[in-house]
Image (cartoon, rainbow, N blue to C red):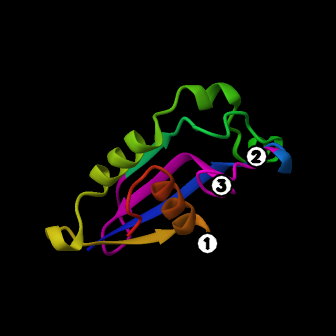
Amino acid sequence: MNYIIMDLEWNQAVCPARLVRTPVLLHGEIIQIGAVKTDDKFNLIDKIKINVRPKYYKKMNSHVAQITGITDMQLTSGETFPQAFRRFKEWCGGSPAGGNEFRFITWGFDDLSMLAASVSLHGRDPS
């Protein structure tokens, strides 16, 4: 079994008045997907970092920029979320049903809920 240790970075509205409320209430938008893949003894197999071009929060929140070091310019050069998520899924290498068993470990406690919200936002089933 492999482990996927994932860390997401996301941008937020620059002020409460700019919070996106439709099509969903959007507290954050993923701007980077980072992960490492290990074997069952946690030996590094591979790593990935994908910059994601935001659809809604295109200007970096100054607090988020300070923490992540991601700039407005970097946001414009990323992949769309559907492209980035597709590439991330391919990189993970399968699913338990497909015979390549892996488990997710997240760096932050909000990462999975943020990922599920982003998947829903882009019209996909988060399950």
> What amino acid does circle 3 point to?
Leu
Quadrant of image for the N terminus = bottom left
Q: Nearer the viewer, residue 86 or 22?
A: 22
Q: Nearer the viewer, residue 91 or 57?
A: 57
Judged by depth in the image, the label closer to the viewer, 1 or 2, is 2
Q: Is residue 68 above or below residue 117?
A: above
Residue sitting farthest toward the front: 22
Report helix, strand or loop for mark 1: loop
For residue 41, which numbered disc appears in the image?
none
Total labels drawn: 3
Mark 2 surroundings: few (<14), some (14-19) or many (≥20) residues within 10 A: many
For residue 109, which numbered disc appears in the image?
1
Relative to 19, 70 lies left or right: left
Q: Residue at x 24, y 57 (%)?
A: 93
> What amino acid does circle 1 point to?
Phe
Report helix, strand or loop for mark 3: loop
Q: Which residue is mark 3?
A: 26
Q: Residue at x 34, y 74 (%)?
A: 41
Relative to 88, 96 lies left or right: left
Report helix, strand or loop for mark 2: loop
> What amino acid does circle 2 point to?
Ala
Q: Position of residue 22 (x, y in %)?
A: 64, 51
Q: Position of residue 5 (x, y in %)?
A: 45, 64
Q: Which residue is mark 2?
A: 13
N-term-proximal mark, 2 vs 3: 2
- Pointers 2 and 3 in contact (C-beta within 8 Å): no
Q: Is residue 86 above or below residue 38?
A: above
Q: Position of residue 83 (x, y in %)?
A: 38, 40
Please give the range of residues in magenta.
18-46
